[in-house]
Each structure stands twice: as structure tokens, then as C-alpha cells.
Amino acid sequence: MRGLDLAIEPGERVLLLGPSGAGKSTLLTALAGLLDPDHAGDAEGRLTVDGLDPRATRDRIALVLQDPETQLVMARAGDDVAFGLENRAVPSPEIWQRVDAALATVGFPYDRDRRTDRLSGGEQQRLALAGAFALSPQLLLLDEPTANLDPVGARLVRGAITAIQRTTGATTLLVEHRVTETLELVDRVVVLAPGGGLIADGDPADVFARHGDALAAAGVWVPNRPLPTRRARPVRPDRSNAWGGATAEPDNSVVTAQDLLVADRVGFTHRGTSRPALDGVSVSLRAGEALAVVGPNGSGKSTLAAILAGLAAPGKGTVRATATLAGADARLPPHRWRAHELADRIGTVFQDPEHQFLTGRVRDELAFGPTRRGEDVDAVRRRVDDLLDRLRLTPLAEANPFTLSGGEKRRLSVATALTTDPAVLVLDEPTFGQDRRTWVELVELLAAHRDAGGAICAATHDEAVVTSLADRVLTLEVRRPAPIPDREVAA
């Protein structure tokens, strides 16, 4: 980001847009006073909050980052929300009143005692938001606050943002790709240009009316712009019951899971209740088909994805692969295959892209899988160059993967799975953080993999992915906690 001239008045509510990598997250981080001026590289210009260096106004600012896991610092949910209040010496009775109010405002589904390491990505996001809201900030900085949330959770969070704007009058800067749903929260739209400066700035209706075509062409999400459809066939619900029941397996099934039962986060129980992460789920992944797994936060989508990818074992139930896919391991479930065999057969994209980076350069990250398999060096280079170009990562080919923006990291993680051309591809939230142009390219790449005979399973909250790509949809539910005997609680 450079050459940006921008003034935001107290109480304004600004939606910050721009192509992926245009500097949106960087601007929020700088406004929060989290950029070290001694290590800022070629820093230019002047940035102030209330006329002061942002580092001098941190007590008036709350920032929610793209990755909520990086903001959780305590073992229990209530303690995490209380952390900032305690550091500001808020009296204890008031702390817990504000903690409970913040948790209720964001629709957090558990009480204060919930372990933070047993939360789904979306639940972590709600908790991070509660920690920000509890501080009653004067400047609220939100970096894609609904990216990992189901539609119901996203509505709750938007309602919470509205409530804090109304009660505190907080100036708000919001980065969000769900533009249509977000417009009710803002009174101004600012669009950053890639490489520097602004594309547009003004009233939302005026900006989209005057610049809509140009913004869409630049990759910016614009309301009421249809997306291309890349389904192989009309979408239909999965015939197997998400909470039990079998289904007849067609000839093109490559991985089949039957009656899965997985305890809730290593069997955690709380106050006489126990809720399994998955219970009685049966599903198949089929060659030449894209399956979307949808459902509320905490319904077990990521757990199911890990089991189908061979990265976790179910507590009960079976997972089998066809002889063609499993080869010599035909009698073993995928989680018992040797690591290099699993990686060659089933490609995985984690919810957190950083959890799968292995090298110090973007180019090396893409080449790692096929090079390890001994593929021709020139063929690998051509494949890497093609993916870099299609996903707009070529200027970042020599960069460290951990220094990319959130959207760039996601594209790289999907591309690393595609480079090995696995028979099965299991993806957890494959499109978060994308501008319109890179979203379309990701969907096109996944559709091409499916059309070539690959099986795809995508756990997602992105309704556009379901509409544009999915041939079949499996909907998971959150089951109500069931009572367990007191002696088990005591144990």
C-alpha cells in the first residue's frame, strides 16, 4: 500500500474494499498501532488517530483480525473476554457483567467455562469479537469478522456490530467480502487500488452505481452481480441422513464413510452434558463430483473433513477407499496409510492455511509435492508458473508464504493441493478472503479438477460455492447436549 490519502471523521462507518493484496489488512493493523516503525521497510507518509501516533491511542481501539486463533490468549472463554478489561483495571464485578453481555451479543453458544482450544473456527471468531466488543472501543477495526461464520452466526455478528455502533458511537472500519449483507452497517465505501491510491470513495449507493463495472472488473465484490455456475449437474441434497442412515453407494464412490461417531473435542463434557462432534454420519465421495458440506459452526464440518482426508480416525464407524485409490492399502482405512501415500492420493486444504506451509518461498511451496514425487523438473516448473499466473501470485513467487495476506495464503494453500493432482481433494473453507476475480479462478480450478474425474469435498459457509460448484450437498446439524450420569461427570 502506498500513496493513500484518506481522512475518516469520528463516528463514520466505513467499508474498506479492494482486490486481494491491496493493503486492507495492512491499513487496519497500522491504525491499531501494531506496525513497528523501526521494522516497517520503506515506510512513507503520516498516519494518526485523534492527531496522535496510533501506538499512543491503543486504549481507544479494538481490532479483530482475519485469523481469530491468533487473538485467543486464555484457556477459558470468559477469561479470554475478560483479559482486555483486566488489563484496563476495570472493577471485577463490572468485568463479568460486560463479559456475559459481550458473549450474549455475539451469540456465543457456550458459557464462560468453555475451553478455547475446543472451539471451531467460527466459534473462535465469535469469541474474538466478544473480546473486542467488551472494551467499548471508540475505534472499531474489523478484518472480515464473518469470514468463518455460518449465515446465522454472521447475522448475529452484524447485529452485534450495529449494537456497539449504536451504544458507543464507535468509528468503524470494516473489511468484508460479504458486501450485500454488510451495507446496512456502513455509510461510506472506500476502495483501495492495487499498487497504491484509491479507486473510489463515497456513499455506497453512489460508488456502486458509478463504478460498479470497473470495480467488478478489478476484482472487487459488487452487490447484485451474478457469479458463473460450474456445476457438473443440478445440485441435490445428499441421500444419506446427516445424523444416521445408510445410502446405496454408486459405482463411482472412491471414499465411503459409514455411521461415524466422534466425541466432542477429545470427549470433553461439561456440567452433566456431552455432545458428540459427529454422530451416525454416513457419506461418500464420488469421482467426477463436488460435494459441499454445510451446517452451523460447531456441527462437525472440519471434523468430518479431517476424517475423510485420512488425518483423523473416527471413534466409531468405518471409512473405506476403493481398491483403485487405496492400492496396496485397500484393507486399511485412509488414516492408517503411510503419510506419503496419503498425500499422493488425497489432497487436503486446512481451514488455517499456515498449518500446511513447509518452505520459505511461494514457488517452492507449489513445487514441493510434485518434486517429492520425482516428477520432471520442467513439467513441475510449467505447472507452478501456470498456477502462479492464474491465482495472481506471480509477483509473490519469491516471497515467504507466511508474509502473504490472508486471501493470498488461502489461494496458495489450494494451489499446493492441486499441484499433485490427487484423486480426492478435501478442502476446509477454500474460498475465504478472496476478491471476486480470484474467487472465480479458484472455483474454475476446482471445477476443472472435478471435470477431469477428481472427487471434491468442500466444507464451507460460502453459499456462493454451493450455488456455483456443488453437485451434492450434505447438511450437518448441531445436536443438543445429552445428559450423562453424575458419576461420569465426577470421573
Image (cartoon, grey):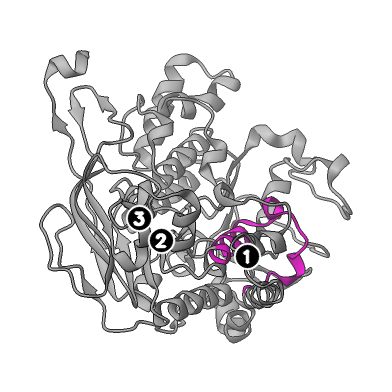
Quarter of the image where the C terminus is located:
top left
How packed is label 1: few (under 14 Cα within 10 Å), some, or many (20 or more)? few
Indicate the secondary structure of the residue bearing disc 1.
loop
On the image, the x and y values in percent for residue 160 come to 41, 47
Verify whether residue 446 appears in magenta: no
Mark 2 or mark 1, whichever is nearer to me: 1
As shown in the figure, which amino acid type bears the numbered disc 3? Asp
360 versus 82 height, above or below: below
Q: Which residues are magenta?
A: 391-416
334 versus 266 height, above or below: below
Q: Mark 1 or mark 2, which is nearer the start of the sequence?
A: 1
For the residues labelled 3 and 1, the Cα–Cα distance comes to: 21 Å
Q: Mark 1 or mark 3, which is nearer the start of the sequence?
A: 3
Q: Residue at x 73, y 57 (%)?
A: 361
Query: Which of the labelled discs sits on residue 479, or is there none?
Result: none
Q: Residue at x 32, y 29 (%)?
A: 111
On the image, the x and y values in percent for residue 187 come to 55, 63
Query: Which of the labelled discs sits on residue 329, or is there none?
Result: 3
Q: What residue did someone put label 2 on?
A: 426
